[in-house]
Structures are given as structure tokens and as C-alpha cells.
Image (tube, rainbow, N blue to C red):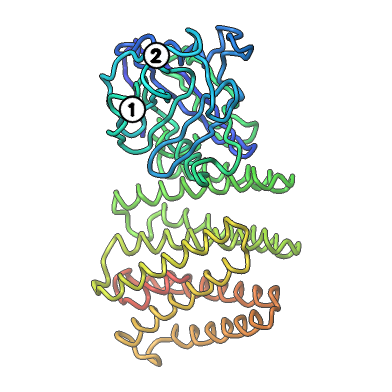
Amino acid sequence: MITRTQQKQRNPLVFLDILIDGEKAGRIVIELRYDVVPKTAENFRALCTGEKGIGVFGKPLHFKGVRFHKAISQFMVQGGDIINGDGTSGESIYGPTFEDENFTLTHEAGVLSMANAGPNTNGSQFCVTTVPCPHLDETNVVFGRVLAGLGVVAEIQRMADDGRPRVECIIEDCGEIPDPDNWDVCCNDGTADRLPEYPEDLHTNLTIEQLMAHVRSVKESGNALWGARRVRSAARKYRKCLRFLEHVRDRLHAAKKPRDSCEYCTLMAHVRSVKESGNALWGARRVRSAARKYRKCLRFLEHVRDRLRAAKKPRDSCEYCTLMAHVRSVKESGNALWGARRVRSAARKYRKCLRFLEHVRDRLRAAKKPRDSCEYCTLMAHVRSVKESGNALWGARRVRSAARKYRKCLRFLEHVRDRLRAAKKPRDSCEYCTVLYCIS
């Protein structure tokens, strides 16, 4: 949660509204350190407002429409070339360049610093650090810090490809914030979404129920965009849902709520809604779209698994932890392949995850529960048969038929989960039941 000073700020606040690949990515709010570097801070403020008009190179002295031309992982993002837009030029409000004011402020994570070509060559280019960068101290002038929108900065950084963003990351709008108590970071894109892009920028104390109501509004906005075939906009809303669901998970974990609390039920109701959306898309033969929904279900079910594991450690085996770490690596590989639009390769990785999760389940069952001692074991044996049928169809390149089998597996795993919940099995009664919750 962001904290705001209760008194009138002496240092001005400015904002940058960012577009990533043509989609609204959120607002970055910056405090300019007039109290330490007034000349440098005034240069950036005026470039945000555009009040100085046209510069000596015939270009507007304004950041609006300027791109971030550099992004380096574990370092910073850089932009502000108002002349060429590629990092080769720039211009300050004082002329082409101006002198280094002082090096009092240091390069912590989340600060703004002037980019230069050597001593006393400050123009309009700036960088935003994402980690501490002490090697820039005494060479680059720090003049501000990010108060909100570090998640947006991190998203630009994730677009990095050999030092440059692989998609256009543009300052759509910018200016000065007149009211220090109203940063206007919440979404205002004409949809029902009223949350900021990232949970850390949420400045109101919402209950879990209120927050989940907002998340549902975000999801419904995504559904509406999807129905209008605005696929990238819809995907951004769904990713926002995931960020806030993880935030809810962390709050529940911190509060140590029991699994059957109303918040848990709300979370599971949400994943059922996502699955039903996938089923509807599948029925409309929109296979790739349905697959995205099912992947979202899997991610959310993994959140549930994390909550169960964090709430009480039913297993203290190093082997188990190591194996699950490997499974997470496989899943991340699948996510990377999916992001590169290598759908079949990503699907193979997700199927591999399922195989190893079942391997974990089998090891726990062998160690704790005899196969024929539990009614759930018999049902799970049938589910395995369905999965093997899906694998055979996949091997025969009958992708749609295989996907139907995998969806059938999900339905029966949810059935097992519901039966366990209805039977009121305590969470730590048996490791086998815990893993069923994880896999389901």
C-alpha cells in the first residue's frame, strides 16, 4: 500500500501515462526533488507540462508521445529523447544541454536520474532505476523518485530485448498533478474497472470481499473487451485480475485464515467462473481462447496450493521441495513459450507439469495411504485413464480431442475436491488429500 504525506507537499508531483504495445499500461507518479536539485527538477516538470513550447531544434519541449528507447533487466529503463526518439539526442528547457547540478541524492531503486553523454551534458533523457545502482553515483544527477507505478516501470523492463523494448512503450500523456492528495492512479478507461494497475498502488483499505468485488469487475471488463475482439486489451485485464488475486492470497496468508473461510470460497468461486468462461469459448470452437482460460485456472489453483502449503507444512521432505521447484521451472518455461506464441511447445510443458504433479501424488499416496483404502483412489485411477487417453490423442495430433480429455480430467478433479470439502476433511488430516487439493 502506498503512503502519502498528510501535509501539503513542497516538491511538485508529475505523472506519466504509459502505453505499451498500444495498450494503456497505467500511470507513473513522480515526486521531483526541488528541495535538492531545483534546476534539474524544473527541467523535468516543464517537459512534462510542455509549457515551454518549441525548442531550438524545432521540436516541442514535451515528453508527450516520446518512447522509452532503452530497457535493461535488473538495471533501468530510459526515455526522454524528444528530438529523435532513439537515444541519440535530446534538449533541455535551458538549451541543448545544461550542467550537473549536484550529486547529493544516490541511485536507490525507483529513482529518476538524468542520462548524459559525459559531465555537464544533461538534456531531456532520463532513466528510472529498478535496483540500486551505486555505480551511477557522482556521474548522473538524481532528481526524483517514483511514488506510484513501479509495476508499470517493471513491465516496460520486461519488454527488454537486447537492451531495447521489443514493443513500443510510449508516454501517452504527462503533466503536473495539482492536488497532492489525488494522484488519479485508478483505471479510467471507460470500463467498470476502478482499480489501479498494480496492488502496491492501492491506497484505500478495502476488505477482502470489497476487493474481490472489484476484481470481478475487472474480469467482466476483460470479458466485454474479449467479446469485442479486443484481445490484447482483454488479456491485460485478465493479467490484472491475476495480480490482484495474488495480492488477496498474500493478505489471506498473512492473516492465517483457515481454508474454509468465506475468502477461500470466494476465490474458488472465481476460478469456477474462469473455467466456465473457458467452457463457453470451447463450445464456440475458439480453442486458443479457451486454452488461455484453462491456463488461468491452473495458475489460480496453484495459488490455492501455495496457501495450503504456507498455512501448514504437511511435508518436510527435502526431496519433495526440490521436485516441486523443478515443476515450477517447467511451468515457467511453458509460460515463456506461450508468450512467444509457441502454443504447442507450451502445451507440452504444461502436460509435463501435470505428469510430475501426479508423480508427487503417487509418492505421497504410496508412503501414506494404500491404494485400495480410499474411495478417492479408485476415482483418481479413472481420471488417470482419461488423461492417458488424452495423451494418446495428443500423440496422434488430434489436438481438439486431446483437449477435451484434459478438460474432462479437470472436471473430475474438481469433483474430487468438492467431495473432500463436503466431507469436511481437515486440511492436515492426510498428505494425499492435501495434494488432491493442489492438483485439482
Left/right placement of residue 130 relative to residue 93 reads: left
Q: In which quarter of the image is the N terminus?
A: top left
| Disc 2 packing (10 Å; few <14; some 14–19; many ≥20) | many
Left/right placement of residue 288 relative to residue 216 reads: right
Residue 47 point in image, percent of width and height:
52, 15
Task: Please tell me which residue is depicted at 55% across the width and 36% down the height of the picture.
Answer: 25
Quarter of the rendering containing residue 150? top left
Task: Please tell me which residue is depicted at 62% across the width and 63% down the height of the picture.
Answer: 342
The residue to which callout 1 is attached is 3
The amino acid type of the residue labelled 1 equals Thr
Residue 14 point in image, percent of width and height:
46, 18
Q: Is mark 1 on a helix, strand or loop?
A: loop
Residue 106 point in image, percent of width and height:
27, 26
103 is higher (above) or lower (below) than 291: above
Callout 2–callout 1 Cβ contact below 8 Å: no
Q: Which of marks 2 and 1 is nearer the N terminus?
A: 1
The residue to which callout 2 is attached is 40
186 is higher (above) or lower (below) than 369: above
Furthest toward the front, the residue is 118
Residue 170 point in image, percent of width and height:
58, 31
Task: Please tell me which residue is depicted at 70% across the width and 64% down the height of the picture.
Answer: 287
Query: Of residues 391 and 132, which is closer to you in this image?
Result: 132
Can residue 9 be seen here?
Answer: no
Cα separation between marks 2 and 1: 25 Å
Task: Please tell me which residue is depicted at 50% across the width and 46% down the height of the picture.
Answer: 162
